[in-house]
Amino acid sequence: MREIGRFFSGFANRNGLPVAIYLLVAVSTWIFVLVILPQLTMFDFSFRHNLPPPKIGGPEDVHTLEQYRYFVMGNEITGGGVNTLDIAVLFKTLVAAVFVTIIDLAICYPVAYLLAQSSEGSAKRLLVLALIVPFWVNEILRAFAFRILFGATGVINGAGMQLGLWDAPIDFIGGNVALYAGLAYAYILLMIFPLYNAIESLDRNQIEAARDMGASWAQVHRRVVIPYAKPGIASGSTMVFMLTAGALAAPQILGGPSSLWFTQIIYQWFNSGGNWPRGSAYAVILLAICIMFVLLIMRVFKVSIGEIGR
Amino acid sequence: MTKDITLDHVSVSFGDYTAVDDAHLTIAGGEFFSFLGPSGCGKTTLLRCISGFQEPSWGEVRIGGKNMAGVGPNKRPTALIFQNLALFPLMSVADNIAFPLEVRGIDRKARRKRADELLELIALPGQGDKKVGELSGGQKQRVAIARALAVEPDILLLDEPLSALDLKLRQHMRRELRAIQQQVGLTFIYITHDQGEALTMSDRVAVMSRGKVEQVADPRTVYDQPASSFVASFVGENNALPGKVLESGDGRMVIDIGLAAPVTVAAGKGRGRKLKVGEACHVFVRPESVAINGDGDINRFNATVIREEFEGQVRHLIVKSGETELRVTQVGYGNGASGTGASVAMSFAPELAVPLPIGHLASA
Ligand SMILES: Nc1ncnc2c1ncn2[C@@H]1O[C@H](COP(=O)(O)OP(=O)(O)OP(=O)(O)O)[C@@H](O)[C@H]1O
Ligand SMILES: [Mg+2]
């Protein structure tokens, strides 16, 4: 807090009081009205009963852990005992998000490395542009395009069968290949740029020094580049993981008939289920579990939260 | 065991630009060999050819008689110390030093032992657990040397390793580097644009300019018998006096350099080049080779002191005779003659003047 105060007075001195006040108002509006307030409302919602509108604010409108209990224990209809169904979906969602994060990391690390360390000037700008421009296409359109691409009569099955690699159409949608591909593609930029920024500031001479001392390329990456890029890897992975776990459109459109994403359950509670408190509770659970998971992983890899901000 | 390094007509081009132009020389195993030249003359590029980061555009590099074309930097018996050292900031000092051993799969204990030995050698015992960032400039320097020595390379390549240090530390490190070299008996190939460094440490020096190797010789020869006007003007201070040959024959040349009378210089005999009558040339006379109020008869001329620069143990006089300006250095107070405007008699021995054909000079 003291630091923020110091920053503010310094900023006011340099840019004048009106600009500083504008900054203060804009940032606090953003944080309080657009971030904290809605989240708090949701949080409060998640501790209430699902009441019909007339009863809201009435004597029955009290705080309760019912919605959380439901997530853990289910109810009579689901057979009592543990709510294995929803817990399994949450677990599957997390595993899938980890999987997508790893795919993105595997794809983006080499690209970011080459972009940062070898190509030069104009070629680099062109490459970056080629990465960004496809993301002007909106998410829904992209998801449907992937559906067509991976469909039974899609380009991939068509080409594969033409070349004689397989003879009956492969069910990429049912096997969730399309979903993983779609999700991995959707957040690729969020992985590339933090990696690129981290690797770009690495002194080329360090890589050459390691080479000169006999390190193979694998050793150069393992001992020099990756430790240096760790904050970038952490921030990219966190973003991709969080956004994948919270994605809705891609699982909705590209998911196979048997696959259910945890966000889809949340959506159902809000939408067709008409139970906002339960939807809120599920959303809070997703957020809390994701944050805990990320913190755990960061502890395992010895990254501090401050490094991610770099 | 020690391996000679041969540069066989090595050239390197970047597009139209020739960074190294036909370097042809052999460095003996165990030698302390320096490349000396101004910034941008291609020293680093040449060193990268030896270490394997740069393939020559023409010619070949041989180490111990083996052609190095296609041999990667990690497969050559060379260790390079970078201009900015390139220590690994995230590793401890000991891990830095042991890195070459680590990548060769040597176990932790043996690595630690070797690192401790090397820390002993570079006079930093017991500092292995420090972070690189906690070291001073000179200490980092020594760690970089220890890291390069860890796997006992045959050849150590050093790219201006002392340029970031202050004067005192630099002089100290010069002695230390030389001592380490004699202790471990490796070939050192040393790059510098600092002639003092090259002359004090090296067995032999290659002077480079604009991508070309102008002279390869021991420091004394480079200083006393420069092979080209660039070498004469770059190494040490020198008066470059443009002139024209009037007479040339039996060991003597008479050259008009704009003084009241033409001067006589020794021709050939290692010092300078024998030139033809009528040829334009430069006569190089070192500031310390000019005697003030001496008793020499030959090449005697009168001059006026126009400026004096006091530098502690030596004193520089800038004198003018006719249209010719000369820089003269005296130890202590020399033969009196002082004060701006004083008139002095100067002379220099014919053997101390070096006549060379016109060529490009080092820019001041
Ligand atoms: N990869 C490259 N591409 C194009 N030109 C280059 C490249 N590397 C070096 N050069 C050019 O070659 C010339 C010699 O460079 P080099 O680094 O060998 O100089 P140097 O003698 O080491 O200079 P310094 O003392 O400043 O380090 C320079 O003009 C430089 O611009
Ligand atoms: Mg250089």
Image: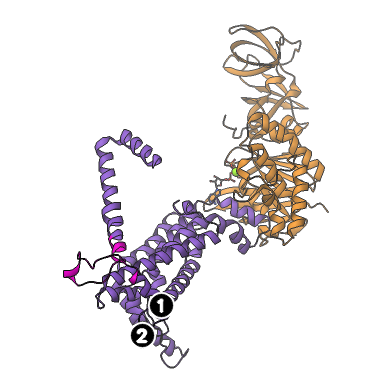
The foreground one among B49 and B347 is: B49
Which part of the image, by quadrant, shows the N terminus of chain B?
A: bottom right
User: Magenta span has B148?
Assistant: no
Magenta stretch, residue numbers: A41-66
Q: Which residue lies furthest to the right in this view?
A: B1
Q: State how the image is colored.
A: by chain
Label 2 resides on the chain identified as: A
Q: Please check the rendered image and state whether residue A59 is part of the magenta-colored stretch, yes or no.
A: yes
Can residue B153 be seen in this snapshot? no
Q: Position of residue B219 (x, y in %)?
A: 74, 34
Which chain does purple denote in the image? A
- Front residue (pair A243, B177): A243
Tell me the tag on residue A89.
1
Q: Where is residue A183 in the image (x, y as percent from the top left)?
A: 39, 72
The circle on residue A232 is none
> Which chain has been coloured orange in this picture?
B
Q: What residue type is labelled 1?
A: Val
Kindly report the secondary structure that dominates the magenta region of the rendered protein: loop
Q: Name the residue under label 2.
A: A257
